[in-house]
Image: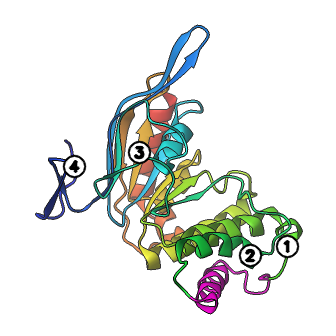
Amino acid sequence: MNTVQQSNEVYSENGIVYPSNIMLDLSKLKKVYPTPKGDYVVLEDLNLQILKEEFVTIIGHSGCGKTTMLSMIAGLNPISGGNISVLGNPVKGPGPDRGVIFQSPSLMPWMTALQNVLLGVNQVFPQATKGQRQDIAKYYLHKVGLENAFHKKASELSQGMQQRVGIARAFAIKPKVLLLDEPFGMLDSLTRGELQDILIEIWNKEKITAVMITHDVDEAIFLADRVIMMTSGPKAKIGDILSIDFERPRTRKSVLESDDYYTYRKHLIDFLEH
């Protein structure tokens, strides 16, 4: 098993020994969809280890299986072969250890921003008092800049504000792994930049392992510790991995002013063009 070893600690799960710093382990992952013309293999022999507190972005051409892989990690799509585990525990369905932010936030339109965030908080923290659960939801809505919109219905919010609620909702359940499926893909560039900054500010504080799909090379570099490049499908797998060595916390200005930024950018574009 190829791993990035940062610690000598190990733990054992089902006879397999893992370095203790691995949060998410994808091993020999396979996804097959049956079709009238035979099986269509989306992913095959995909192996990836993601560390605790690591922020990873995933890029690749449309149709290479990025979203399929993310939905399998989330437990929303059955695994055809191989294994996915979080801290050594096999993924067998959705769970509060994984929070998901989709491209469309899928809010309950008749509920307020606060009520939408509380949906998850109430499920994950049933032992907390009503006041404590409200405090958690309000804290994360404040963090995403919606302190004046607690009681606005989701249907009254702009697309950017709805996605802020989606970010607050995902962080509020305190997941071990945060999964992001092109969360800013439908937003204008100004709103996109604002929400990237908000996301990374909260992530810097919470240090939750994050896995994010993006089509935006600049976004991939700015946010990530590593950029994972997937080969084109069918039978997609990991094609290349690029470590991003900018210090954290990082600013957009410092990233753009670095010579390394252009080297990273060229590497990713060259991969995508081949």
Left or right of residue 226: residue 19: left
Question: Residue at left 43%, top 68%?
Answer: 208
Q: Position of residue 200 (x, y in %)?
A: 52, 70
User: Dot 3, crowdedness within 10 Å: few (<14), some or many (≥20)?
Assistant: many
Segment tinted magenta in the rendering: 129-150
The residue at 58%/7% (across/down) is 37
Name the mark nearer the viewer: 4 or 3: 4
Secondary-structure class at tag 4: loop
Residue at which label 2 appears: 115
How much space separates mark 4 and mark 2, taking CA atoms?
41 Å
Q: CA distance from mark 4 to mark 3?
A: 14 Å
Mark 1 Cα within 10 Å, few/some/many (few <14, many 20+)? Answer: some
Q: Label 4: which residue?
A: 3
Q: Earlier in the sequence, mark 2 or mark 1?
A: 2
- Spatial CA distance of label 2 from label 1 is 9 Å
In the rendering, at what x and y percent does residue 75 appear? 50, 47
Does dot 2 land on a helix, a strand or a loop?
Answer: helix
Q: Which mark is residue 228?
A: 3
Identify which amino acid the numbered label 1 is placed on: Lys
- Give the amino acid type for the residue marked by disc 3 in the picture: Ile
Question: What amino acid type should be assigned to the residue bearing mark 2?
Answer: Gln
Q: Nearer the viewer, mark 3 or mark 2?
A: 2
Q: Does the residue at mark 4 contact the one at mark 2 (Cβ under 8 Å)?
A: no
Q: For the residues carrying marks 1 and 3, which lies nearer the camera in this image?
A: 1
- Report the magenta stretch's main SS: helix
Disc 2: CA contacts within 10 A as few (<14), some (14-19) or many (>=20): many
What residue is disc 1 on? 153
Q: Is residue 157 above or below residue 187?
A: below
Q: Is residue 115 left or right of residue 69?
A: right
Q: Nearer the viewer, residue 246 or 58?
A: 58
Asked if disc 1 and disc 4 are in contact, CB closer than 8 Å, the reply is: no
Percent of width and height locating residue 36: 62, 10
